[in-house]
Image: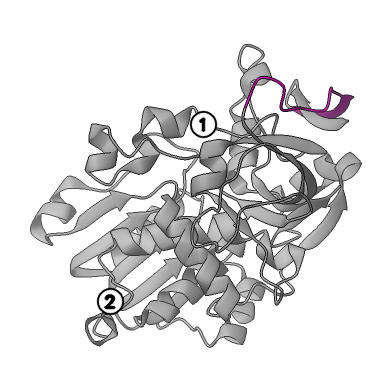
């Protein structure tokens, strides 16, 4: 099968053996499409000759189950998975037992960290084990296209961040007292802003790119430079966005860090945090519950993901990466 491999920070397409279920339980999934995540690009940027062989690229997968040797229903399902099912999935699952899981920090769990799919979503086939099937795999609803369903995992990451901000989905009376700003309006910022709006908070968005600032208006979201914000979600990968956040956050506010920045020495000032009683917290990857909520948000139309993706072939994955880096597209996906 064809599979994308990283060599010297460049993508090459190699032939690999198709995974099988010999001596293991789970399913083989034929990848139909796989979204390109910003984290894939970060992995490439930070790769070295020593770690390239360990880097797995691609995880925003929609595919068809072509082989399965377990009877598992999956989260919220009424019947077990079977051959021919079209599914999307999260690529990690936690143990639910360790200290980190007990504290709700599922993405810090060692089982979570080590439970990736193999060999990665930019391959024609992947193996998903029984725990993936039980906790992170969802059958495609009839009302969603494959491209729309590929947003299951990235949207669940946004939902995780929103929950960590203190917003609770079934408490909209409280949520509407909060003003929330999304800083950075790429594809993940568009998802984040819509999801926050679905939670019931007063939602705003800002990007230095005027086209993106205009585009977010399609979702009923604007920017008001004359107010301070109770919640700020950092979906920009630019170090300068930190300064913007500190200027725009209100006293007692929360800043949710949802992206890495190139400069490890750029951060939030201690005295601002102290005197303004600010909360600065990170949010990384989703739990199975966040994936389930993402599934419902997409199925019910709470978040609109139409017309924000550009299609590339596997052989043109490198072009998708470069176009994303240069801001030519909002979101790339690979059709296999």
Whether residue 34 appears in this view of the structure is yes
Write down the residue under mark 2: 228
Q: Is residue 324 left or right of residue 318?
A: left
Relative to 66, is 99 above or below? above
Relative to 3, is 330 above or below? below
Q: Quadrant of the N terminus?
A: top right
| Residue closest to the far top | 50
Choose between 24 and 312: the one closer to the eye: 24
Write down the residue under mark 1: 115
Which residue is found at the position 86% from the left and 42% from the top? 314
Query: In which quarter of the view is residue 317 placed?
Result: top right
Q: Is residue 243 left or right of residue 114?
A: left
Choose between 118 and 58: the one closer to the eye: 118
Q: Residue 236: give x, y in percent of width and height.
A: 50, 56
Q: Residue 308: give x, y in percent of width and height.
A: 71, 69
Q: Residue 95: give x, y in percent of width and height.
A: 37, 35
Q: Is residue 81 left or right of residue 180?
A: right
Magenta span: predominant SS is: loop
Q: Residue 4: give x, y in percent of width and height.
A: 80, 32
Q: Which residues are magenta?
A: 10-24
Helix, strand or loop at mark 2: loop
Q: CA distance from mark 2 to mark 1?
A: 41 Å
Relative to 226, is 309 above or below? above
Color theme of the render = one colour
């Amino acid at each position: 099968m064809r599979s994308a491999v990283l060599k010297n920070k460049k993508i090459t397409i190699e032939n690999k053996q198709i995974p099988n279920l010999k001596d293991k339980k789970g399913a083989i999934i034929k990848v139909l499409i796989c979204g390109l995540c910003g984290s894939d690009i970060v992995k490439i940027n930070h790769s070295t000759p020593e770690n390239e062989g360990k880097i797995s690229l691609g995880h925003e997968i929609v595919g068809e189950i072509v082989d399965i040797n377990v009877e598992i229903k999956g989260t919220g399902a009424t019947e077990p998975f079977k051959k021919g099912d079209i599914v999307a999935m999260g690529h990690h699952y936690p143990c639910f037992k360790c200290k980190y899981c007990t504290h709700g920090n599922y993405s810090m769990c060692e089982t979570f960290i080590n439970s990736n799919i193999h060999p990665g979503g930019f391959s024609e086939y992947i193996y998903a084990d029984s725990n993936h099937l039980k906790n992170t795999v969802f059958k495609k609803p009839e009302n969603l296209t494959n491209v729309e369903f590929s947003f299951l995992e990235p949207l669940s990451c946004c939902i995780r961040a929103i929950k960590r901000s203190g917003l609770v989905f079934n408490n909209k009376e409280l949520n509407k007292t909060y003003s929330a700003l999304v800083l950075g309006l790429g594809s993940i910022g568009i998802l984040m802003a819509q999801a926050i709006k679905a939670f019931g908070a007063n939602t705003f968005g800002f990007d230095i790119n005027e086209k993106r600032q205009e585009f977010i208006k399609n979702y009923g979201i604007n920017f008001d430079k004359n107010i301070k914000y109770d919640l700020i979600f950092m979906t920009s990968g630019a170090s300068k966005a930190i300064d913007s956040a500190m200027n725009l956050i209100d006293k007692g506010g929360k800043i949710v860090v949802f992206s890495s920045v190139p400069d490890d020495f750029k951060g939030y000032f201690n005295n601002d945090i102290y005197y303004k009683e600010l909360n600065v917290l990170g949010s990384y990857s989703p739990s199975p519950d966040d994936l389930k909520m993402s599934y419902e948000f997409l199925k019910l139309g709470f978040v609109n993901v139409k017309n924000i993706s550009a299609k590339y072939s596997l052989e043109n994955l490198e072009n998708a990466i470069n176009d994303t880096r240069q801001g030519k597209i909002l979101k790339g996906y690979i059709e296999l």
